[in-house]
Image (cartoon, rainbow, N blue to C red):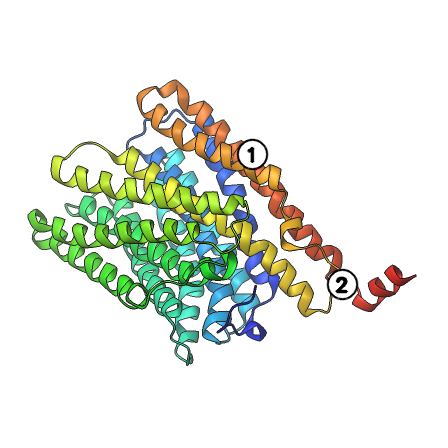
Amino acid sequence: MIGSGLSLDQAPPFEATGRFFLSVPVFIIMAGLVLILKDLDLVRTDPSVISLIHLFTLGVFTMVMFGAIFQMLPVLAGVNIPKALLVARLSHLHLVLGTLLFSYGFLSEVTPLIAIVSSIFLFISFMLALGTALYALKNTQKFSSTVKAISVAIVSGLITSFLGIWLLQDYANEYSEVHSVIMAIHMVWGIFGFAGILIIGVAFKIIPMFYVAPGFKKFCKRWVVPLILLGIILWTLLSLFLPSLDWIGLFIIATFFFAFSVTVIKKLNQRRRPISDVTVWYWRLAGANLFIGMLVWLVNEFIVLNLDVYLGVFIGGGFILSILTGMLYKIVPFLVWFHLNAKGHFEIPTMREMINARIAKAQFSFHILSLILVIEASYSPYMIQFTGMAFIISGILMMINLLKAVKIYYQYKDLDPMDIFETKES
């Protein structure tokens, strides 16, 4: 299970990352409640939709990515994040407060003051999490492909946060002429630079390690992330100064995400131990949705159709949310097992026993249903409430499963391993 190149003695305490992961289903449930209680028009510029989008991008996506960065950098790069538990607590607190204030501000349309206050909380959170991680990286001697990808993702996350804070201030002071362009750039850096590149980097390590699949080829690990970054930078510059040619950058980004989606599915099909696992379903679903989502983005660029909802469903929900959910079902049990093992507990449930497979499969069904219903709701507004119910049920099922694993951790955490062993012997 433990692959080479891991420095497990550097891993932060479970409490540092667990708080991020356990917050995810809460924000999924909150997003479902917004869909049920708020009369939404699924248009990207609608304040309520902006609130809903950021419940996912900040409350779900960023939560998982911050937790993953806190956990994986010490393990993969062999670096100590200074005061990891304190930084995690403060970053998590400010991310929760900033996201809640942001969401409330746009739902209630009391945006000027709320925008300023929420931007302060979010800025502190991003600087604490990503700034500290970037500072820790200066001491690493292990610049593997995954560490390089995480480093690029961290910088992309900081760029995304700066752009987001500018947009919040601009929104509070009425729109400027470049608001829509900066909004698009903010989205591309967040989706493809922060989330997308982080997912690719983590996949380099997780897919061979957790799924006993063939490793990625050297070309893929060496060049895919730099070329995607090149595409994002080129797309950004062209969008600002020569928008008629921004499709060149888009084409570069799309090409390598196409390649990644196909490669992921291929690697999973080549697993040496093809055991049925719901997390494999999530990765396959994510690969398929990423492929379709990039096609939709290309079509929308050249034919100029109003496909924002489809882009949100296929790339945001189908790709990012699917992979992050699958990762949670692997990472949380692994962390519980690892930290208890490090304390000397060997008579503990296995990783597979920490997650209820039936509940995970049920949640997978509601996850797919929620994505389908979002598309339906874009044509039939009365379906929005059903969409919200699907998200709420999905979030509740995820919470039940994650809490089961966390409960095991706290059951064994403070026990003396020898006492458990002697009890079993007697």
Task: Compare residues 78 and 120 and report the one nearer the observer.
Answer: 78
Q: Position of residue 231 (x, y in %)?
A: 19, 58
Q: Is residue 166 visible?
A: no
Quadrant containing the N terminus in the rendered view: bottom right
Residue at figure coordinates x 54%, y 44% from the top left: 276
Name the residue that disc number 1 marks. 362
State whether residue 204 is above or below residue 45. Answer: below
- Confirm or deny contact between disc 1 and disc 2 (CB under 8 A): no
Q: CA distance from mark 1 to mark 2?
A: 33 Å
Name the residue that disc number 2 marks. 414
Question: Which quadrant would residue 321 be assigned to in this image?
Answer: top left
Question: Which quadrant would residue 332 be assigned to in this image?
Answer: bottom right
Q: Around disc 1, counting alpha carbons within 10 Å, would you say few (fewer than 14), some (14 to 19), or many (20 or more)?
A: some
Residue at figure coordinates x 44%, y 27% from the top left: 387
1 or 2: mark nearer the eye? 1
Q: Around disc 2, counting alpha carbons within 10 Å, would you say few (fewer than 14), some (14 to 19), or many (20 or more)?
A: few
Residue at figure coordinates x 29%, y 44% from the top left: 291
Question: Which quadrant would residue 135 be assigned to in this image?
Answer: bottom left
Q: Position of residue 128 (x, y in %)?
A: 44, 65
Q: Is residue 382 left or right of residue 340?
A: left
> What amino acid is at disc 2?
Asp
Element on which disc 1 rests: helix
Q: Is residue 375 left or right of residue 295?
A: right
